[in-house]
Amino acid sequence: MRGDVVYAAFGDAGLHVLRIKPEGGFEKLGELPGGKRVTDCCFVGDRLMTAEGLDGWAVYALDGPTGFREVARRPTTPDATVAFWCWAAGTKHAVLSPRNGPYCVVGLDDFTRPDPFCKLHVTCLWDKYLPDALVGDRLAILNPYSGLVWCDFVGPVPKAGAREKRREQPAGAQVNGICAFGDRYLYTVGDRYQFVLPDGSKTELRALPSVPEFQKTNRPRFTGIPRSDGRLVALTNRSGARYAVYDFADPQNPKLLDAGELSGRPDLAAFWNGHVIIPAGHQGLQLSVRPYVARRDI
C-alpha cells in the first residue's frame, strides 16, 4: 500500500497497480512492464521490491504510481533457484526467500552483493512466517514448529540471533504467524495470542474470541497469520480458506468484528482507512465493503 494505491503481485499476470475508488472497489492504473512473473512485493523505504521467479529479485524507483525504473536486480543462484517472497526489514534491509533454501538478509544499498549479510534457517518455507515490519532493532521470525528465530540489526551488519527451542508442536503450527503491533510483535499460537517485545520477553497467552460460524463446522478452532494496522488485526488462514477480523483497541480483550470463508486461498491482509484488503488467490483481491472502524478512531 502507498496511500490509496495498491501494488498487487498477480503471479503469471505480473504486478498490477490499483487505486481504491472512493465509492469502493479498484481501478487499474497500470502494471509493471515486460510481462514479468511477480509472486510478491514490498516497499523498503521508498523503493519497491519484487520477487520475480526465475528472474530473481528486483528493486524499482517509482516516478508516480506507475513509473517503474529498475535500479537493482539480484539474480537466482544454484542455492536459490526461484525468487518467491520478499519482506522489508526497516528501510535499508530486506529478507528474501528462495523457497529451496534459507532466508537471506540483504542490504538495499548493496543489493547485488553475492553473499547475503546472514542466512536464517527456518523450516516450512512454503508460507509467510516473517512480520510485516521491524520492531526496534530485532526482527522476530517464526519457525512454526520450534518457536521464534531472531535477527539482530543492532550494528552495521545484520546478524542471526537467538533461537527458541521447544519440543512440543504448537496447535495449528503451519498457520500460526507474527506481525508488528506498535512497539512489539503480535504472535498467534493456535487459537491464542501473545505479545513479544524486541528483548524476547512475552506476555501471557490469551484466547482469541471464538468465531460462532466456525463452531458449527468440523474445523471449529481458528488460527491464522496476523496483520495489523495498530488497532485492527486480520487473521488469514490459507489452508482453511478462512479469515477473521478483530478490534484490538483493548489488546487484552479483543473483539471479533467479522469472519468468513473464501473460495480462494487468502494470503496476508493489508489495511486502508479501516478497511481490510485480502488477496484471495483465484477469487481476486478482496476489499471490505465498509470500514470496520471509523477513520477518526484509527
Image: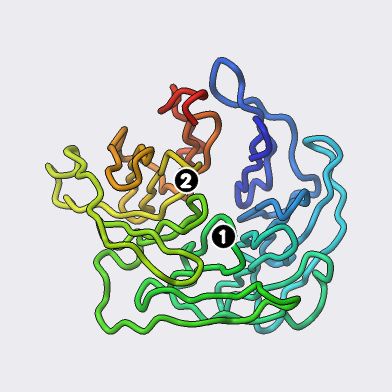
Looking at this view, name the residue that lies furthest to the top: 23
- Amino acid found under the numbered disc labelled 1: Val
How dense is the environment of label 2, judged by Cα within 10 Å: few (below 14), some, or many (20 and up)? many
User: How far apart are the alpha carbons under marks 1 and 2?
Assistant: 13 Å
| Relative to 176, residue 62 above or below | above
| Relative to 93, residue 285 above or below | above
* Residue to which mark 2 is pinned: 228
Secondary structure state at the residue bearing disc 1? loop
Where does residue 271 sit, x and y in percent of width and height? 52, 37
Can I make out residue 128 in this image?
yes
Residue at figure coordinates x 58%, y 75% from the top left: 151
Numbered tag placed on residue 101 in the rendering: none
Secondary structure state at the residue bearing disc 2? strand
Along the line of sight, which residue is nearer the eye, 22 or 232? Answer: 232
Q: Which of the two discs, 1 and 2, sits closer to the camera?
A: 1
Numbered tag placed on residue 135 in the rendering: 1
Horizontally, residue 27 falls left or right of residue 146, namely right
Where does residue 132 sit, x and y in percent of width and height? 55, 55
Q: Earlier in the sequence, mark 1 or mark 2?
A: 1
Horizontally, residue 257 falls left or right of residue 271, namely left
Where does residue 211 sit, x and y in percent of width and height? 21, 41
Quadrant holding the N terminus: top right
Residue at figure coordinates x 70%, y 56% from the top left: 50
How dense is the environment of label 1, judged by Cα within 10 Å: few (below 14), some, or many (20 and up)? many
Can I make out residue 279 in this image?
no
Where does residue 18 sit, x and y in percent of width and height? 66, 32
Residue at figure coordinates x 35%, y 54% from the top left: 224
Quadrant of the image occupied by residue 91: bottom right
Along the line of sight, which residue is nearer the eye, 17 or 146? Answer: 146
